Image (cartoon, coloured by chain):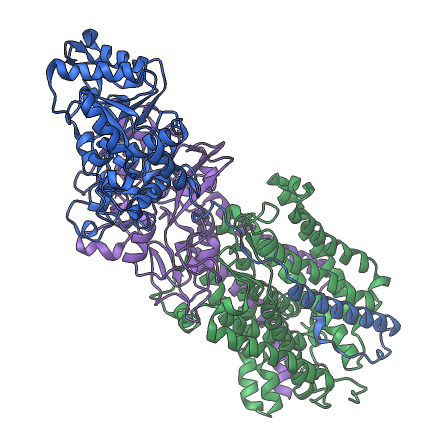
Chain colours: A blue, B purple, C green
Amino acid sequence: MHKELKELAEAWYARPIEDRLGMTRRGFMQFCATLATTLGLSRGAEAQIQKAIEQARRPSVIWLHFQECTGCTESMLRAEHPTLEKLILDVISLDYHETLFAAAGHQFEAARIQAMTENKGKYLLVIEGAIPTRENGIYCKIGGHTAIDLARECAADAAAVIAIGSCAAWGGMPSTSPNPTGATGVDSILDRPVVNIPGCPPNPYNFLATVVHFLTFGTLPEVDHEGRPLFAYSRLIHDHCERRAHFDAGRFAMEFGDEGHRKGYCLYKLGCKGPETYANCPTVLFGDVGAGTWPVGCGHPCIGCTEQGVGFEKPIHTLAQLKSVHPPISFPRIHEQQGSGAKTGEAAVIAAVAGAAAGAGAMLARNLGKARPADAPAERTDKDGGSA
Amino acid sequence: MTSRRDFLRGTLAGTGAVAAAAVAPRAEARPMPERSPDAVGLLFDGTLCIGCKACVSACKEVNDLPLDYNSPVDALWDTPLDTTARTFNVIKVYKDGDLSQKDSVENGYAFTKASCYHCVDPSCVSACPVSAMTKDKVTGIVEYDANICIGCRYCVAACPFGIPKYDYDSPTGAIGKCELCRHRTEDGQYAACAEVCPTGATLFGKVGDLLEEARRRVALEPGGTTVYPRGDITNGPDQSWEGPVANYQQHIYGEHEGGGTQVLHIGAIPHQKLGLPALPEYSYASRSEGLQHGLYSGLVLPLALFGAMTWAARRNSRHDDEEGGEK
Amino acid sequence: MSSHGHVEHAPVGGRLFTPVTFFLAMLVILALAVLGVRFIHGLGAVTNLNDGYPWGIWVVADVVIGSAFACGGFAVAALVYIFNRGEYHPLIRPALLASLLGYTLAGVGVLFDLGRYWNFYHIFLPGYAHVNSVMFEVALCVSLYIMVLWIEFSPAILEKFGLKHARKKLVGTMYIFIGLGMVLPMMHQSSLGSLLIVFGHQVHPLWQTMWLPLIFLLTAMLMGYAIILFESCVAAAGYRRSVEVHLLNPMARLMLWLLAGFLAFRFADLIARGALGYAFEGSLQAIFFWLEIACFALTFYLLRSSEARRNPANLFLGGVALLMGGILLRINAYLIGYDPGAHWSYFPSVGELVVTIGIFALKILAYIIITRRFPVLPREHAPATH
């Protein structure tokens, strides 16, 4: 980069963050709080995030594209809090991005090499798209290098590797059968941990929150067995779905456009994969325009795009396997205790009757005994009502 | 005056006659009926049930049934503990340990459906003194008519599955039980529980077709995939879907139990764990009715007894007669 | 021919309003109050009945046991008219009265328990009658038998009002009703056992047998004799009359033979079915089975010899023990041994108990009133001073 430009940039960063991001102080604080919430952090974390974003030196980010549709990038560009271009230009230093860079050809590749050299061991590597492995990966080349080589080269000195989108996470769309290019996820060709942010496209805030977590705490967020951040991918869509009440009540849309569909009933019968897909879609939503803005909210069944083996694998109309393993308490068990046993009142009545009967019977028997021989009149005894 | 010996002889003879009458039906228990070729029923496959309770809510809707609360304190949801006079169909859960595995006996859970089994030879029909509970000759549906019912609840006590239920909370309570949505057949519709079932866990159709489908499923290789029909297997449109095959128990509950039922159950855990009683292959009704037929067939025995008694009474009460005349 | 045919019956007389009758009336009123709630709010409001135990003590105590209690008339009529033991004739009318009250109130008790009692007449409509149903048989026979009992007892009423001509006409055809009065109870008392056969495995093997009709019939007859022992002693004590030991002693002896036959049969059946082993399990059912058997055995002990049977106390207690055995058999078969699943439980509610007590109180009250005003009990040579 030119020296002048660098100076200009220095001057730019000397300004307060809200100026740089083109947002009010209040807006900036809201942004930090949003990210802290997305990450599921405790109270006070938004201050830490704010401090980190204000003070941290913009980390260099290298963003590689392989077998993909650029949908992940497109989705990122449409984030609103703040607009992502502000963020990727101002919060991070996006030093290499094929879609967003004006540069081309050797100049472009040089920028990557320069960023890698200057920020050795400190830059973030983001990979979008699957990596073809068949025939040594010749199906995807950039500047003459295969995706495998590029990924390995860039990952070698990266501080952290983030695989964005389902393609990068496990191969996604390009890896579906018969998978002619041998497309696979990033972590299967690298020997280091990779944070996967699957989704087609993933929610931009899940990516952003992962980056900011790294900025704030210097570490990547905790991940599940598939490398997905727990803050975003530990909850079943089905369990947080706004249509769950309809599922529990057995109200289903039977086909697109029918009465149940128009009334917002559960989409399970249309093949919704919410019951077997882990993602925070129902809680974070998409597009920053308010309630209902996510696939199921709009009336389309979830296709399970964040779930390997579900998204792009199972036909959309195929029924999901329910993963909520604990049946809710509202199911009656096979045998439920019913009816009432003996209580004090009843026991008392029976004891009283039995006592009276026994007493009367005993008295009667005694008097009858005395009355022998049979012809003599019996002693006076009153008949007791309980003796029956 | 007759001696005590005579009396004893008489007593024993009388006892012997009754005893002989009771023995007779044992030899000739009433033969059990066959399933009507047009009998309809349900096939419940526990491995397909996801516990969504769509069948429970649809049943309530089409039968116009009120909500059923199991606790007066928390009367928020329809939460019947079992089938009741106001709930004809309930999904129950078997639970064990940490519930981690569906259709596993240990550390697992499994769903089952409780509703009328529409026995081929139903105890409730045999029990009902006034023909309020009847079995349709064609469809085999066990039907109930509250306008005839006297509310004796013999059917409630007699059913080996505990299906007919009485509404104790109403001064004009009636029996409530599944009648396979017979009121919907006029419109060409069928049992609502099968109609709404998203996975085909509850399947409607002629019992012959259902039995065939059940046999096909239990014979499948576990772990493979197969096509599961949904809705009405006999007349309905094809709504089938492809899904994995569970490890079925090699038994179709209801094929022979209690003389056979029209609602069949298959699943991956033993049926007895799901509260289905191990019934003999004969129906209890055939025993009970066989006995009654033996004792009362053509009223021969009671009439013979009556004749003998009247003859004896006439002979031995002549003295009373005269005595009465004297007064 | 009857050698003791000529019996004179006479009202006992005395006041109707006594502390005893007042107390009984109070019990009846209490029961009526509970029944009011039952008819306004439904069975669930006063009973502990549930779908596991749809039959509670209103069926078992009021009807099944109540009607067995009322077998005295049938049992004595069998002695007098069928086996021509005219010497027992004096016992007939009081026994008939007890039967009449027992059956009538059992019939009324059924109406309290029926969920849709206003449809009860459907039993008699050929279009509705279901002849394969044991319940149908019971309902029809009991209804008919109640009518037969009223006819059998009507001479006492006609005598009271001096309608001699009507009485004479009736007595001429009485043998038909006596015949019916023998057959009908045999039919429905055995059927009260048959009712349980369709319950199948739900009834414990100690009681579930194809021989239930015979078991119930034999115990009903036994209870009929036992209730005569009981009633004679209680009536004698209550009205300060002498106990008819000269009649009761030989009757008790006959009863023991029948009881011995019954017990032998009961165990033979258990052994033949291989069910006796259940009696030695540590279950509630086993305990109640032995209680039931113990009551029958106690009857033997109390009435063991002619000497013992001459003691009215033994006659009374022997009757009570035998009644308890019969009661326990019925409670065991219908409730203790009835198992719709371990998750169901039932114990009679206070309301149910109050109604059952009320029904029995009404029987006693009616017995007192009728014997004081109608010619039921044999005329005493030393009339009651009450």
Query: Where A205 falls versus C129 (above or below)?
Result: above
Question: Looking at this view, is A314 or C258 the one in front?
Answer: A314
Give the farthest residue toward the bottom: C162
Q: Quadrant of residue A222?
A: top left
Number of on-image labels: 0
Q: Quadrant of residue B311?
A: bottom right
Q: Quadrant of residue C157?
A: bottom right
In the image, B229: left or right of C296?
Answer: left
In the image, A100: left or right of B166?
Answer: left
Residue found at x 25% / y 49%: A291
Q: Is residue B104 visible?
A: yes
Check the picture and name the quadrant holding the C terminus of chain C.
bottom right
Residue found at x 43% / y 39%: A326
Q: Is residue A179 visible?
A: no
In the image, C273: left or right of A227?
Answer: right
In the image, B211: left or right of C89?
Answer: left
Question: Looking at this view, is A240 or C141 the one in front?
Answer: A240
Q: Position of residue A143 (x, y in %)?
A: 14, 12
Query: Where A163 falls versus B197 (above or below)?
Result: above
Q: Position of residue A11 (x, y in %)?
A: 25, 31
Check the picture and name the quadrant holding the N terminus of chain C.
bottom right
Give the farthest residue toward the top: A135
